[in-house]
Image (cartoon, helix red, strand yellow):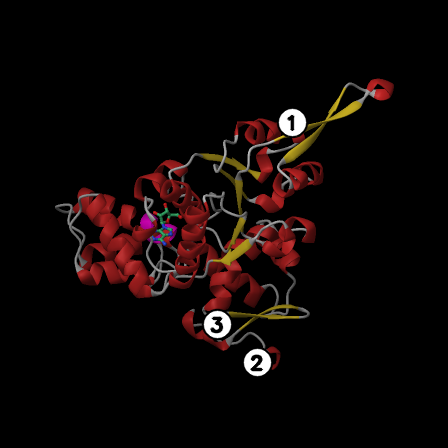
């Protein structure tokens, strides 16, 4: 999904697809998750049964869609793709269910955004591989029961907490994707530079990795930007010097803070005296939906130790003030 911070960097599906690993063996990092999925796949193959429904959760850009597309390829089966927001009524979901062949996969991105009517419609489909369809209206209405092939739902969500318990319970396996280590991101940058037929030095790969906020999609976007910059301003090779200049132009600092992260922190410091401030209030001040702040901005700031959550809201930390080279607005609050 596109982020609010992507104005200067394309973040669309086409970009993602070109660099997406094709096989499980090409997936970098997430070792524990991948190993469990291998067992899951292996058992499925040996029993010749469809894979149980799988829920993937974690922040955007960490590989949920990647895993969802790799698994059917490993099993040599088909994949259909849809998303919660595009399923506004049961009739939108029905074609996917009836098209699903035995053992095939249905990937539902942002599954937490599926309306309640669709959610109720999918329960029997996931549990018993059948749907109840109402035909006609009023007094003539009748329900027919339709059998489906045994298929696998892979749900992806950035907010597993927003999933209803009945929906969550219908997933046999749930896997959480976590942020990546720098060494893993370096590996992803190196491999993808090769796919893009671009030379990159080890230092430059590291400089990209450390600005990627633990997120492969970010690493890919920054790699593409560095490559464009290198092509425009130099001979096309990505060196340390090129990377430094390219990121200065994007206003991304050494640890990956972007203009909008700094705006968040500055607003928390200046408008809210360092906090505590509620995420709704922060969203209002920044003119950014609170959901977006929670999904796409705060995880990195929390992980970097620049903000803390308290029962009364977000609080800026000394580390943030030091990083921004600011003095405490109200030392008492910190
Ligand atoms: P999500 O669905 O969680 O938002 P994606 O699966 O679309 O994230 O990942 C975005 C891009 O990041 C992919 O196209 C791929 O190039 C890269 N990527 C993600 N996870 C990995 C991984 N484990 N190994 C290599 N590349 C990855």
Which residue sits furthest left? 235
Q: Quickly name the residue at label 1.
A: 91
Viewed as shown, does residue 214 lie left or right of 330? left
Mark 2 secondary-structure assignment: helix
Marks 1 and 2, how far apart in space? 57 Å
Mark 3 secondary-structure assignment: loop
Q: Quickly name the residue at label 3.
A: 305
Mark 1 and mark 3 lie on one chain; the one further toward the N terminus is 1
Q: Main secondary structure of the magenta part?
A: helix
Q: Quickly name the residue at label 2.
A: 331
Residues rendered magenta in the picture: 217-221
Q: Please tell me whether residue 220 belongs to the stretch shown in magenta.
A: yes
- Reply above or below: 196 against 86: below
Mark 1 secondary-structure assignment: helix
The residue lying at 87 percent from left, 20 percent from top is 139
How packed mark 3 is, by other alpha carbons closer than 10 Å (few <14, some 14-19, many 20 or more), is some
How packed mark 1 is, by other alpha carbons closer than 10 Å (few <14, some 14-19, many 20 or more), is few
Mark 1 and mark 2 lie on one chain; the one further toward the N terminus is 1
The residue lying at 30 percent from left, 52 percent from top is 25
* The one of 289 and 117 positioned closer to us in this rendering: 117
Residue 296 location, x and y as percent? Answer: 50, 54
């Amino acid at each position: 999904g596109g982020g609010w911070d992507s104005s200067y960097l394309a973040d669309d599906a086409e970009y993602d697809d070109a660099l997406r690993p094709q096989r499980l063996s090409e997936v970098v990092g997430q070792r524990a998750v991948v190993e469990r999925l291998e067992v899951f796949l292996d058992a499925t193959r040996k029993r010749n049964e469809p894979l149980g429904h799988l829920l993937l959760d974690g922040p955007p850009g960490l590989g949920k869609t990647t895993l969802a597309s790799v698994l059917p390829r490993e099993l040599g089966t088909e994949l259909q793709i849809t998303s919660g927001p595009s399923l506004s009524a049961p009739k939108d979901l029905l074609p996917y269910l009836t098209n699903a062949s035995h053992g095939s996969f249905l990937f539902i991105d942002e599954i937490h955004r599926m309306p309640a009517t669709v959610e109720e419609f999918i329960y029997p489909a996931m549990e018993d591989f059948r749907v109840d369809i109402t035909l006609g209206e009023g007094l003539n209405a009748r329900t027919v029961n339709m059998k489906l092939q045994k298929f696998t739902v892979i749900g992806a969500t950035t907010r597993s907490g927003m999933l209803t318990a009945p929906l969550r319970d219908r997933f046999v396996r749930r896997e959480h994707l976590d942020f990546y280590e720098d060494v893993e991101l370096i590996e992803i940058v190196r491999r993808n530079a090769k796919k893009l037929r671009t030379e990159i030095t080890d230092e430059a790969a590291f400089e990209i990795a450390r600005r990627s906020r633990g997120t492969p999609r970010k690493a890919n976007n920054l790699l593409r930007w560095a490559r464009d910059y290198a092509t425009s301003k130099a001979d096309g090779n990505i060196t340390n010097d090129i990377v430094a200049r390219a990121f200065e132009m994007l206003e991304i600092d050494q640890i990956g803070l972007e203009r909008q992260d700094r705006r968040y922190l500055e607003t928390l410091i200046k408008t809210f005296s360092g906090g505590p401030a509620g995420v709704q209030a922060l969203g209002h001040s920044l003119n950014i939906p609170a959901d977006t702040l929670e999904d796409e901005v705060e995880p990195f700031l929390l992980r970097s130790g620049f903000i803390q959550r308290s029962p009364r809201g977000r609080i800026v930390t000394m580390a943030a003030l030091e990083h921004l080279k600011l003095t405490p607005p109200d030392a008492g609050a910190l």
